[in-house]
Image: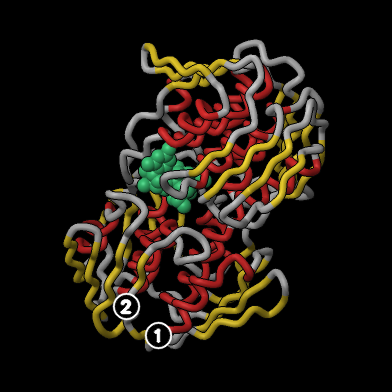
Amino acid sequence: MDKFVIRGGNPLLGTLRVSGSKNSALPCMAAAILTEEEVVLENIPQVRDIETERKLLTSMGAEVELGYGRAHHRTTISCRVLSDPTAKYEIVKTMRASSLVLGPLVARTGMARVSMPGGCAIGARPIDLHIKGLETMGAQIAYEHGYIEARAERLKGAHILFDKITVTGTEDLLMAAVLAEGETVMENCAREPEVTDLAGLLTAMGAKIEGAGTPTIRVQGVEKLHGAKHRINPDRIEAGTFLIAGAITGGDLMVTQCNPQHLGAVIGKLQECGVRIEATGEDQIRVRSEGNLKAADISTEEYPGFPTDMQAQYMALATQAEGASLVKENIFENRFMHVQELVRMGANIRVDGRTATVRGKTPLSAAAVMCSDLRASASLVLGALVADGESILDRVYNIDRGYERIEEKLRGAGAQIRRMGNVFS
Ligand code: EPZ
């Protein structure tokens, strides 16, 4: 298993380039199931979860080309033949987002067998709302041997009201609705930019969608969809992570190929902490800090609120801020896996249910730490960048799931970080 060796203390200077969004690319790749024609997606990030999605689609009979040349990070997907509309347990257990194939498989082939996603480090993460929506659209659902089986001659347009806001639930049912018979109205939808990005691809494929990015999405079902070419959004969470890397190290960084419009809550919060941030163009942000950070509370909310995927990274920053910061995690029930590891580095953090109290400023000292889930791992990288001495981060495959060559990017901005062990072992 790969490890990272990080020696803290260097301010990050220069430029960090943001890759395409993993959480946009995953639903957009699944959307290729909806047509027998070729779908070309650009700005695909070179991360493990994309490779997992390639394996998943290929296992169902799709042809998936995936290339990461200097010129392009592109995938070309052809689902002309879907010989086996099944998402197998061996693949689903490594990536819950596999459930995104459920809606498009039923819509395109009339049937889907998807392994129930097991538990996950950050919470139970059921997909009951995905299934309830498909049933509302007329799918017959059965459960056996740990699989969900969904069947429908042709899904029917329906009125769907989500009990809770769910990002992939909104995406899954949006992909089911575009080929359904008649109109579907979905209420209490997720407003994340990844939903809007997916709707952009589906519209380019011939779907009729109104309201993506708002709580109510209206879809007129069509008979068929055609191929399309689409460029994936920049990854707003990678960009946010880099902004915090610049702030926590007291550096001066330009974060490029990002979309400042998607980072309002994060930028606002960092400015409240005393970080100097300015959008210096439509796709770049400059972040500077002299280290005199002030404590500020966060409460994670659905978009456009402060993203849960930035909570762990913010907590690392809060350890370096003067005062007490309250960090409330409202989306997932177990998303404090990074706390104990940060405490081992010297942080003063106390957890009470869904609220962590971070008292700073505490100097962090280098330690051997364990990466757990993707964003907790990013938090440990940020801590190690300011810790005194050399930290060893184990199980960095967790980071490789959602960050493209993060050690190369950070090294390019002056971080002392290297990978031990063979890449993607
Ligand atoms: C997406 O997960 C993201 N993943 C997550 O990013 C992100 O943390 C999350 O949205 C919240 O923003 C992808 O887009 C691939 P949810 P998702 O359904 O869709 C409950 C990362 O780090 N819920 O919006 O699985 C659920 O348990 C990952 O990149 C149900 O109860 O999250 C949670 O408490 C981690 N029933 C809440 O809703 C359902 O059917 C929000 O979950 C679905 C969800």
Could you tell me which residue is drawn at 27 percent across and 49 percent down? 334
Please name the residue that numbered disc 2 is placed on: 320
236 vs 241, left or right, is right
Q: Secondary structure at mark 1?
A: loop
Front residue of this view, candidates 112 and 314: 112
On the rendered image, what quadrant is the N terminus found in? top left
Front residue of this view, candidates 8 and 269: 269
Q: Are there few (<14), some (14-19), or many (20+) residues within 10 Å of tag 1? A: some
Q: Can you say whether 287 is above or below 201 in the image?
A: below
Could you tell me which residue is drawn at 42 percent across and 61 percent down? 301
Could you tell me which residue is drawn at 29 percent across and 56 percent down? 338
Could you tell me which residue is drawn at 24 percent across and 59 percent down? 354
Q: Quadrant of residue 416?
A: bottom left
Name the disc covering residue 291, or none.
1
Q: Is residue 318 visible?
A: yes
Q: Quadrant of residue 257?
A: bottom right
Q: Is residue 400 visible?
A: no
205 vs 102, left or right, is right
